[in-house]
Image (tube, rainbow, N blue to C red):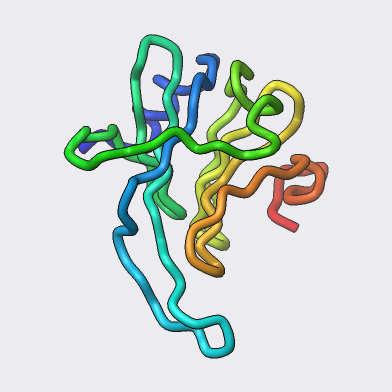
Amino acid sequence: MKNFETIKSEIVDSTLVRIYKTLEPFTTFWFEGLGNLLSYKFIIEIEGGIKYELGYDYLLEWNDEEKIVELKTDFKNKYYNKKIIDLISDFEDESIYLKLEDEMVLYHDNTFGSELGFEKYSNIFDEKGKLI
């Protein structure tokens, strides 16, 4: 398995092409009041067809062993074909964030199952780059 800095050097300055999720959840868990929550794996594809699994707290080369489907969101046109300018690993909340050229950030939020977070950098990090 490659370390974070190696993967970061492969991803930074590349273009985000697509985002996928696994067809089947990799885990489920009970959340009182909401029921059974499903967790999926998110996979990012950069130019050249290279794919990485974007976990909440890890980033790995995708192994192509599971069926995946392209993620269809209302805001996908806002992050597709954007340059990835930084890959941030925050040690406070143990999360991985992809910072895009337009100061937007993508991340895997697992608070209530699996959600793809997409927010302004300034809503997540302060001017010194610290998690708010």
Residue at 33% from the left image edge and 58% from the top image edge: 25
Q: Position of residue 92 (x, y in %)?
A: 57, 61
Q: Is residue 115 above or below residue 16?
A: below
**Residue nearest the viewer, comparing 72 with 83:** 72
Query: Which residue is at 49% across, 58% downward?
Result: 114
User: What residue is at 67 percent from the left and 25 percent from the top?
Assistant: 77
How many numbered discs sit on the rendered protein?
0
**Residue at 50% across, 19% down:** 17
Q: Which image quarter: residue 103?
A: top right
Quadrant for the N terminus, please.
Answer: top left
* Place of residue 109 in the rendered image (x, y in percent of width and height, measured from the top left): 55, 57
**Where 7 falls versus 71 (above or below)?**
above
Farthest residue, direction top: 48
Q: Quadrant of the C terminus?
A: bottom right
> With 82 as the anchor, is 29 left or right in this view?
left
Would residue 58 appear left or right of 131 to someone viewing this image?
Answer: left
The foreground one among 73 and 91 is: 73
The percent position of residue 38, horizontal first and vertical second, equals 42, 66
> Seen in the image, is 81 located left or right of residue 26?
right
Corner quadrant of residue 63: top left
2 vs 82, left or right, is left
Q: Please state which of residues 33 and 111 is positioned toward the viewer in this rendering.
A: 33
Residue 12 in the image, given as x and y percentages of width and height? 51, 21
